[in-house]
């Protein structure tokens, strides 16, 4: 999954992928693969990127988790999509207070 927030932040600062790669002490192609989502960006790299780009981590961070679709409808025998995430993040408590989650 491409890191669009990271791409936009880098472009807004007028920095090239090569310049970022040099600041991270890696070669250009390694950084390019990270920005394109082909290689996972470690949390320490996210923190360094935040400092290099002079933006809060929250402005550039994008999860590595992918989205999964589950198809089921036991009642009617028809199949309908239900959206699920592989991991539940802390913000779920803010969206669904008191542990109440939507019925799927």
Image (spheres, rainbow, N blue to C red):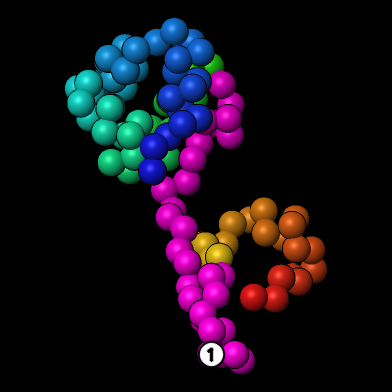
Residue 9 horizontal side relative to residue 36, left or right: right
User: What residue is drawn where x is 71% and y is 70%?
Assistant: 101
Residue 44: x %, y % from top left: 40, 35
Between 50 and 78, the residue placed more toward the observer is 78
Classify 10 Å Cα crowding around label 1: few (below 14), some (14-19), many (20 and above).
few
Please state the extent of the stretch shown in magenta in the rendering: 55-82
Q: Quadrant of the N terminus?
A: top left
Q: Main secondary structure of the magenta part?
A: loop
Residue 58 lies in magenta, yes or no? yes
Residue 35 horizontal side relative to residue 78, left or right: left
Residue 73 horizontal side relative to residue 95, left or right: left
Q: Is residue 47 visible?
A: no
Residue 30: x %, y % from top left: 22, 30
Q: Quadrant of the C terminus?
A: bottom right
Q: Where does label 1 land, which residue?
A: 77
Residue 21: x %, y % from top left: 28, 20
Q: Residue furthest top?
A: 14
> What is the quadrant of residue 94 in the picture?
bottom right
User: What residue is drawn where x is 46% and y is 31%?
Assistant: 4
User: What residue is drawn where x is 42% and y is 40%?
Assistant: 43
> What is the quadrant of residue 84 in the picture?
bottom right
User: What residue is drawn where x is 67% and y is 59%?
Assistant: 92
Residue 46: x %, y % from top left: 43, 33
Residue 1 horizontal side relative to residue 90, left or right: left
């Amino acid at each position: 999954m491409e890191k669009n927030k990271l791409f936009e932040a880098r472009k807004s600062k007028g920095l090239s992928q090569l310049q970022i790669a040099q600041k991270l002490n890696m070669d250009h192609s390694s950084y390019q693969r990270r920005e394109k989502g082909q290689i996972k960006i470690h949390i320490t790299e996210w923190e360094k990127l935040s400092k290099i780009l002079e933006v809060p981590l929250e402005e550039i961070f994008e999860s590595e988790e992918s989205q999964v679709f589950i198809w089921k409808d036991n009642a009617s025998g028809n199949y309908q999509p239900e959206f699920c995430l592989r991991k539940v993040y802390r913000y779920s408590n803010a969206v669904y207070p008191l542990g109440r989650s939507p019925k799927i």
